[in-house]
Amino acid sequence: MTLSFPQLLHALLPEASLVLGALIVLAVDLTIGRTQSPVRRIRAAATLGLLAVTMAAWHAINAGAEGSVFGGVLVLDSLTMATRTGVLLLSGLTLALLPGVLRLPHPAEYVATILFATTGFTLMAAAQQLLVAFAALELASLSLYVLAGFDKTRRESAEAALKYFLFGGIAAAFLLFGFSLLYGLTGSIDFMVIAEQLQVQRATPLLVVALVMVLVAFGFKAAAAPFHLWAPDAYQGAPPSSAALIASASKLAGFVLFLRLFWHGLGPAAGSVSTFQGAPGWLPAVAILAGASMLLGNLAALAQWNVRRLLAYSAIAHAGSLLLGVMAARVSGPGPLFYYAATYGLATVGAFGVIAVVDAAGGCHKISDLAGLQRRSPLLAGCLLFFILSLAGIPPLAGFFGKFAVFAAALRINGLAGPLGWLAILAILLSAVALYYYLVILKQALVTPAEPAQTRRIAVPRAAGVTLVLIALFLLLTGLFPSLILRLFRS
């Protein structure tokens, strides 16, 4: 075992940049910012946060693919680099949307908490041991609980944070218990060693219990049914920028950690989806979670009148499709899953960015609050069109190719008659259902006239406008040229 502290420091430079950036944001606001206006404090905090994210992204890209670091504590490969860069991009876009739309009294604390959450995301991307994975996951989760309840002027925000925290605490207990059982069974916390031990061990009742515990915890983190109950309230009550981070960067980092743990560490205990009568494993359970998430998410979204709750149930449905990508990753590799999660995150950040601007201009809770958006702000309406169509999977936007890549990866395993064929068919059929409720949003924004009290034009902050246009262009560019992302995973 090679323990090189300089190598470890080099590998953790992205995380060090984020933590240092958070401390600088707090120090500047505490000393200079107290005498400035709220608008300048928000701009200064967001700017410093963006600089920290940019520095972290530069270090993440230059870290290279060195393999295992510090005796296997971390791993630097193409998936680590891509995921770190992806979550940093999503967090940076969230920060770029803050000037002009943030209405919270403590902007520096808010930006610092976003940076701490991002630190957890980047660690999750590189984790190769159970202990590091748990610490990174909880660092991100604790920060997200705070972000969800940051708006102390609204009861919904406090309710969102409380439910998120309670469910998250229970999930953390399940995860830690499952990890402790895995350690007891294999004598190691390293993913690769765990896989080697499971190769020579039979499936035991204790292993089944450990798998159930870990699946319950990750089901919560992914907002997969039936562990989704926190998501609609969290998305509805949290500030829009907090909800954007929960739905985008959190999902990307979580699914990459899920993929790495279950295939690299628990691959020998996967079992088979083709029959539920064979040896126990986690693949049949994940298949059930995926199917239930797609069904519940899409059908429940049809009944929603609150735009944020609709996006929450949409996120549950997308979690089911992402789980399909996890199951297919043994054959297709991580490329389709990463592409889907990253482009879904971009579209979600953009959608919540539009909601944040409209909310700052007079409130945006019901879908009907978007009525007449094409007259009140053609820029917001045009950007929302890109984001919603990408979420619905309409070509040539990135959301279409994301779904296509995941479904094709599932069907690559013996086609429609293969073990994942039924899930791919279900996902394709439910995509038509999803198209309906996405079009309901666009109908309000582009067709339905505004109420007399909502005819005032919306002034879009310059930073938010530029950020939304960049997201829309990136969704179009990666949809037309998906190889820009997928080539990162070609050997």
Image: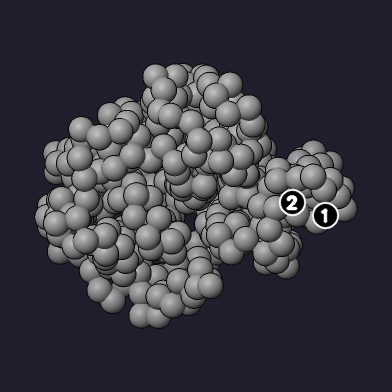
Q: Which residue is mark 2?
A: 69
Q: Quadrant of the N terminus?
A: top right
Residue 351, percent from left and from top: 36, 56
Residue at image location 60% in from the left, 57% down from the top:
80
Left or right side of 267 for 120: right
- Of label 1 and label 2, which has the lower sequence position? 1
Q: Residues within 10 Å of mark 1 (few under 14, many from 20)?
A: some
In the rendered image of this protein, does residue 189 appear above or below residue 308?
Answer: above
Residue at image location 49% in from the left, 39% down from the top:
199
Q: Residues within 10 Å of mark 2 (few under 14, many from 20)?
A: many
Residue at image location 63% in from the left, 33% down from the top:
189
Residue farthest to the front, as pictured: 200
Front-lying residue, 432 or 129:
129
The answer to whether one can see residue 162 in this image is: no
Q: Amino acid at mark 2?
A: Val
Residue 221, percent from left and from top: 44, 35
Q: Mark 1 touching mark 2, by CB under 8 A?
A: yes
Label 1 secondary element: helix
- Residue 7, label in figure: 1
